[in-house]
Image: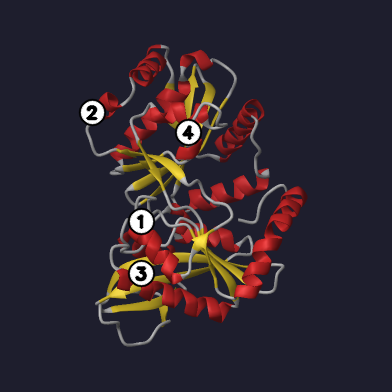
Amino acid sequence: MFYATTQEITTPRPTAGGYTMREVRSATQAEWDAILEAAPGGGHIFQSHEWGEFKRQRKWKPVRLVLERDGEVAGAGQFLVLKTPVPGKLMYAPKGPWLPWDDEEAVRTFFRGVLTVAEREGVHTVKIEPEVTEERKDVKALLSDIGFTKARYDLQFKTTMIIDLSPSEDQLLKNMKEKTRYNIRLAVRKGVRVVEDNSAEAQEAFYQMMQQTAKRDGFGLKPREYYMDVWKAMYDAGRAHLFFAEHEGERLAGLLAYTFGGKYWYKLGASTNEKRNLMPTYLLQWEVMRWAKSQGITYYDMVAIPNPNELNENSTMWGLYKFKVGFGGEIAEFLGCLDLRVKKVRAAAWYNFEPLYYRAYVRLFHNNYY
């Protein structure tokens, strides 16, 4: 199955269900991403090889683990390991792992392997953020029995809007709210068009557009260097696609999409203060949906919306929610971030110290270490 170096990390004899665990070392992008895509659910861009290698540049060490059954991939998870000020390390699986959650033996076998690696690496806390929905009470109970507890805060957005792109374009339009369809058609009538441009000049223009958006809407940005580095890594890997809505040669809105397998994510969006009455953001979303569908992509994650308990007009994300819900998607609320304390005393110390360290880090570097 594997073309990369692997190492057994549980007993060499399979479990009663035929499961074994391996750590995949020196995997190429193609090798690891094929493993991840073969895992149940098809993985996430933050579990991809290229994301792990980008985070390696920022002092995280990627560790790639595979659950096998009869020589075939049964599950996979990429964990990022970081040394913390509290003696020991943090081990974090952003948007992972990807496992057959209905199979208790598979899940338990996987996390036994995770604990073996955590002990070897000197990890005090394991963090996971699987795309398992809140309604899966059975999985929540199983993870609780393994030892996971709810983390203080979620590191990725817990609730997102998912659109199934498999229906016809006509049906996708019918699934939208009437006002959204109207705004798309208005943009077309007014001569707005959408183009893909991944050039360095386009990336700089998009960042400047993000600055305008952040100032207008009152949110913070990471340092420019971070964006440029991560975009280069993802563009070079063929995972990032930058689109613009233009009118008479003027860029009015931009959308950065990340792709992996049959999925894509609305990673970042921005717009200028000009010609907003032409509804460029609506046409931009629709044309990128059409582009993704033409590429064989059937799963669109619009990412950030308010959590159900915050879904009201007082939410700072209410406007974003109203925009996204118009495109006909369905709300998906995931479990969020969960912690497993491997070294209980050190893990407790890190839990208590991290808020102070996090705030100091952000003030000093204008970014966070996750």
The tag on residue 137 is 1
Give amino acid for label 1: Lys
Lower sequence index among marks 4 and 2: 2
Label 2 to label 1, Cα distance in Å?
Answer: 33 Å
Question: Mark 3: which secondary structure?
Answer: helix
CA neighbours of label 4 inside 10 A, class few (<14), some (14 to 19), many (20+): some
Residue at (69% x, 55% y) in the render: 355
Q: Kindly tell me whether residue 171 is visible in this rendering.
A: yes
CA neighbours of label 2 inside 10 A, class few (<14), some (14 to 19), many (20+): few
Residue nearer the viewer, 13 or 269: 13
Residue at (28% x, 25% y) in the render: 173
Left or right of 215? Residue 160 is left
Q: Which residue is mark 4?
A: 311
What is the quadrant of residue 294 in the picture? top left
Label 3 to label 4, Cα distance in Å?
Answer: 32 Å
Lower sequence index among marks 2 and 1: 1
| Quadrant location of the C terminus in the rendered image | bottom right
Label 4 to label 1, Cα distance in Å?
Answer: 22 Å
The tag on residue 107 is 3
